[in-house]
Image (cartoon, grey):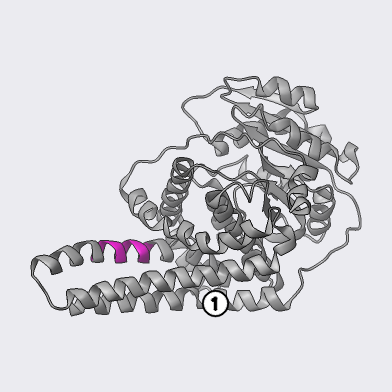
Amino acid sequence: MKTIIYLNCMISIVFTLCYAYQFFYIFIGLLKKPKTFTASCNHRYAVVISARNERDVIAQLIESIKSQRYPSELVDIFVIADNCTDDTAKVAEQAGAIVYERFNKKQVGKGYALDWMFNIIERDYQDKNYEAFMIFDADNLLDQNYIMEMNKVFDQGYRIITSYRNSKNFGSNWISAGYSLWFLREAKFLNNSRMQLHTSCAISGTGFLVSAEIIHANGGWIHHLLTEDIEFTVDSVIHGETIGYCAEAILYDEQPTLFRQSYRQRLRWAKGFYQVFAKYGGQLFKGILRGSFSCFDMLMTIMPAMLLTLISTIINAVAVPLGFLANSPETSILLQTLLQTLMNFYGLFFILGTITTITEWKQIHCSKIKRILNLFTFPIFMLTYVPIAVIALFKKVEWKPIKHSVVRTLDEVRGDQIAA
């Protein structure tokens, strides 16, 4: 039993060593303001939206794109109505998008839809000379300055850029708030700090720009694992690309509110992280040996936390019952160690959540009481990742769509805070 206790201590030490550098990121995020840029010219973009049965929300996204403070003649909107059984295509077309319907039950997922659309654009729209593509999910809303701000960073030479991911429905419940706070932390204390240190950022699902040069060189979108965003990030970093971050380009994203939705989504994410590690882990290690900090950073992003959690869970799941069966006097010490670990976990994410809430207070669009209550539920939300990470290792996972139904305008989203 002492061995188990020592192993738990070792896991805690390794975890701390792996992620100590991210505490340095926090200080950078607190001490340095986000970088600002200017653009020498306006570039031409194609917005690409993959949508599956998104009739309820897609018109609001298209309207937010058409309302941009950026020359409208330099932005075209393409919607992939992907395996839809509703009238998403009709709604998107009426809203002003160029719509293509795709039906393919074998190649399922956002990555395949993007690849299909990029090939059409390459074939039929060469005369448009798009310089980059902006990728969004159908449930998103864009701040009026989004494209203008992304253009400034693109003009600096960054070929991949991510943005500030906010939420449409922070205040719905503890689940949506948990997601929202995590993405705010990711923007402020990961990508913002990486940008300050001139290392590579990471894209996260939606709200990112990729140069047409990269899509053309790759022959389309070639990343088809369950987490195509992380796969694209890791592959780009391995090949020496530095992903930029635009703090002033704000995107509002709908978060799940039901635990079964959240479980299914995060199960896919966890499985996708395992897939990315299996496919690219060796190349990341080689990059680290070459002195690439970005490769180290991405390796820490995709694997150690889940791996260490998995090892700890399995060890303790076996050790505790055996200790009771053997009537070992050290079982109580083990239980105390486990309780202390849980308390440390809760305390860590309470602190991270508190820091993020304070710094991003004005960006959280819900009542003050909900913002404060979320500080206490955020660690619980993060703790639910533990069983999900374990299940993902053994369970076959397939991509499944999540229904989006939060129909709101930008004024309505921001009005939550004003009303509170």
**Residue 185 shows in this picture:** yes
308 inside magenta stretch: yes
Q: Position of residue 271 (x, y in %)?
A: 41, 49
Q: Position of residue 92 (x, y in %)?
A: 73, 26
Q: Is residue 226 left or right of residue 102?
A: left
Residue 12 lies, with reference to residue 272, above or below; the image says below
SS at mark 1 in the image: helix
Disc 1 residue crowd, few under 14, some 14–19, many 20+, Cα 10 Å: few
Q: Quadrant of the C terminus?
A: bottom right
Q: Position of residue 147 (x, y in %)?
A: 81, 48
Q: Which residue is nearer to you in this view: 391 or 343?
A: 343
304 inside magenta stretch: no
- Please report the residue visible at 66 percent of the width from the left and 61 percent of the height from the top: 187
Residue labelled with disc 1: 21
Residue sticking out furthest to the left: 326
- Please report the residue visible at 62 percent of the width from the left and 71 percent of the height from the top: 355
Q: Position of residue 312 (x, y in %)?
A: 30, 66
Q: Is residue 143 left or right of residue 88?
A: right
